[in-house]
Structure formats: C-alpha cells, structure tokens
Image (cartoon, helix red, strand yellow):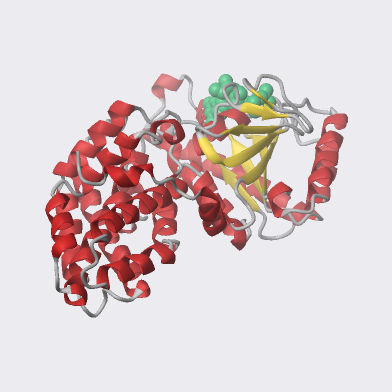
Amino acid sequence: MSSYTHSTHRSWNRDQDHEYYEHECKKFRICIIGKAGVGKTTLLSKVFGINEEEAGVVRPGDAVRNGGGRHNIFDAIIDENRNSALVIHDSSGFETGEEGNLNLVKSFIEHRSAKPSLQEQLHCIWYCISLVDPRQLHDAERDFFRYLREKDIPLVFVLTKYDAFVTTKVAEVVESMEDATADDWKKGRQAAQEYISDLRSFLEGTMGYGVKVQEVSKARKDERLVKKLVAETTAIVKPNLRIVWYRAQGVLANQKRHACVDHFPEKLLNSLILTSSMPLNPFRGVQLGDFFEHTFHHCLTVWNLPGQSVLFTKDYVQQMFREASQSYIRRTNIAAAIDPLGPLDAPRYIKVGIQMACDLIMIFQQLFWATPRRQKLSFSDLRRELELYRESRIRETIHRGVEGEVNLGSAFSVKKLVRVVRVVVEDGCGIAHSEAVKNHKPGEVASLDEPPFAELPESSS
Ligand SMILES: Nc1nc2c(ncn2[C@@H]2O[C@H](COP(=O)(O)OP(=O)(O)OP(=O)(O)O)[C@@H](O)[C@H]2O)c(=O)[nH]1
Ligand SMILES: [Mg+2]
C-alpha cells in the first residue's frame, strides 16, 4: 500500500463541493411528454442511463419508493446510483384525443413554474412525436403547443423512431425489403428528411422560427442523432444550468471533459501551489494525497458514471486510481518531505499534482467510453480499464506533456495551470483518437459503445 492511506480517512466536504459545482441547483429537471409507445422510456435510457423500472419515484409529499412501475407526470423519477444529476418527469403515454391528459400536463407545468427555487422548476421539456405514428397531431395537441410557446421553458421536439420511419419509406418503393439496394435506402432517407422538414415548417409556424426539432432512433447506427439531440438541448439550456446538464447527459464525453477542465476548482490549485512552495514543508506528500482525493471527487461529480456511487466509495478503489496514475509516486513523496530547496523545487511537486489531474480526467473519459452508459460500471470493467491506462502510451504522453509545460513561469499561476491541463488533456485525446482509429474494426464497436473518434475535433464532419 502506498503512503497515502492516512488521507483516505479524511472525509470529503460534500457541501462545499455542491456549492462549488452546482450553485443553487443540484439536479437537472427534465420533463418528457408524448403519446403511449412513442419511445420516451427508450430515449431516457439512452441519454441518461436511467431505467424507469429500477428508479425510485418520489410522490409529492411522499417518501422515495423503489421500483418505478406506474407513475404520473407529477412523480419525480430519480436514480442516484445511475445518474445523480437528474430528475425526470414522464407524462406516461396518453392516447390521441385524451384531452384530459394534456390538461394534466398543463397543470403540472403550471405547478412547477410557480415554484420559487430554480432547483424545483422545470429546466427543459422534450416533446416526443413518433415518426411512424399513423395518429396525426390533433387539435388539443396544437393548442398545447401554443400554450408551450408562451412558457419560458427550453423545449425540443423530438421525432422518435427515425430508423423505423426510413424503413417504411424504403418499403413503399421496393417489392420486398430483401431486394432493397443502397440506392433505395438513400432515397428512403431522403424521403424521410423531406417529411421531417415539412413537420419542422409546421412547428415553426406554430412555435416561431428557431424552434428545436431533432429526429432520433434507438438503432446503434443512429447514435449521432442522439448526440445531436444532446447538443441541441445544450444550446437552449440556461447558462447557469449548463454544468448540471453536462453532468446529467450521458452521451457527449467532450462536454464533460471540457467542464472538468474549465471548472477545475481554483481552490485546489491554489493550495497545491501554496503547499508546494513552502520550504521544509514536511506535509507536502500528505497534501499531494489530498489534492488527488479532491480532484478525484471533482471528476466523479462531472463524469457522473452509472454505478459510481456504489463502486467508488471504497478506499481501495481510489487507491487503484492512484496507482494507475502514479505507480512510481512514493519516491517523490518521500523526497517531498525532506527536500530543503522549497520554492526552487516546487514545480516538481506541482508537476506531479498536474499529472495526476490530467490522468484522472483521461481515465474517467476512458471509463465513460468503455462502459456503455446503460450499464453500470462493474468492478472488473474498472480494473481492466485502469490496467489499460497504466500501460498505455497516453499516460506517457500526458506525463511528458506536463513535464514540458509546467515550469517556473507557469507553476505559480492558477490560470496557467488550468491551461496546461487543457493543452495536455487535448493532446492525450489526440492519441486516444489515433489508437481508437487504429484498433477500430468496422462493425465491431460493441466493446466501445461510443467510438471516441466520433466526437473529437479531428473527425467532426
Ligand atoms: N424501431 C424503433 N423502435 C423504438 C424506438 N424507440 C422505442 N422503440 C420501441 O417502441 C416501443 C415503446 O417504447 P417505450 O420507450 O416504452 O415508449 P414510451 O413512450 O415510454 O411508452 P409509454 O411508457 O407507454 O408511454 C418499444 O418496443 C421500443 O423498443 C426507435 O427509435 N426505433
Ligand atoms: Mg415509458
């Protein structure tokens, strides 16, 4: 065991962190509306890793019940273990012509709008319309859209089952689906897009120009559509809620990565600088351990991986992360306690701290990519990924990068250190990208649910 064990008993100050990352708001509150069977539950599980059957339901004025089951829109669906940054309100399916249902939704929206705190208000609405639903939009729904238009709540129209819709378009022109050529599929997609653009014009007519409309599907090949939905939603989420949204969404690693760097707690860097530069400070090693622990919690907060709240509470898990980052740190640690040089040598300790921070961000990203977000992270996944990281070229590159960037000119400025983390992490992503491309076999992405290259700048198309 390393010499850090003493610091693992120190408890992390939750309240402070909440204050820091979440301002007045700890959870993103989203409301999803749509007729029966349009795919609401499927979408929620894709984007947020939430399974309604497993999640807890909070009835107003009631305690948390386990096992969702039947619920109505007033119930708050919460699953701390899978996604600690999210509250869902699901309208549950209603049938065409059931005006009563939309009135219930309306009274729910009124009820939430009247809440005094940001935390209790609705932060976003996804209104789902199935592309393959023969049921047309009816008058009550159109009235409801006009009602939503007057509300100051970010709203996206989500057109579901795009995959099935394209298939029906292809089926309209071929004798049998087996005979469909690549060209037929292309035409099918074109026809689908034409229909969507008509629907968009209609919605623009009702809601005003600039209304957000995004088609999605549950098919793996259409993952980019779900990503677009997340990106579109980000664009309209109120700025003071963005960080909570970044935490809640389980689709875009780059949002989480940037949030992790841009919101790196200044307090932490300040104390790293301070303790490193005190001459003859016998506690530098301990303080490096604290720095690690707080950075670890910062990553946990932002990456918000499914299952982390159960898995990561164990001391030895943090220990495993430490070893993946700095299996050779003990020497530095001992040297830190006896080194008489003080400020002159401080960059070296700051370097170790910054390397740990960059490692953690890279490891969390790797865990995010490697475990499909609908699955909880398991202990064996974790062990495998940490092992991979430890042996990877990425760690080497990161450490070398920090060596090069941290010097007497940058080591004592919080701003400059954040910049170092940003530059080094982006370089590390470049390596991750090229390795992913190298190892990527077409049609074999199951183990890499989300190929990282899909969202790195080099491959944005
Ligand atoms: N082809 C296709 N099927 C989908 C898609 N999304 C959902 N489905 C299927 O549609 C059915 C209903 O999906 P759910 O997610 O349960 O729909 P829901 O809106 O939650 O339904 P209620 O809870 O009854 O209101 C399931 O069989 C899903 O597998 C999609 O994008 N494409
Ligand atoms: Mg459902």
Horizontal relation, residue 430 to residue 199: left or right: left
Q: Quadrant of residue 436?
A: top left
Residue 447 appears in the figure: no
Quarter for ligand 1? top right
Horizontal relation, residue 50 to residue 116: left or right: left
- x then y, percent, for residue 122: 71, 47
Above or below, comparing residue 325 to residue 425 in the picture: above
**Of 428 and 170, the residue lying toward us:** 428
**Of 84 and 143, the residue lying toward us:** 84
- x then y, percent, for residue 61: 79, 32
Q: Quadrant of residue 334?
A: bottom left
- x then y, percent, for residue 78: 61, 33
Residue 108 appears in the figure: yes
Above or below, comparing residue 322 to residue 63 in the picture: below
Residue at point 14%, 67% (across, down): 339
Residue at point 57%, 22% (across, down): 54
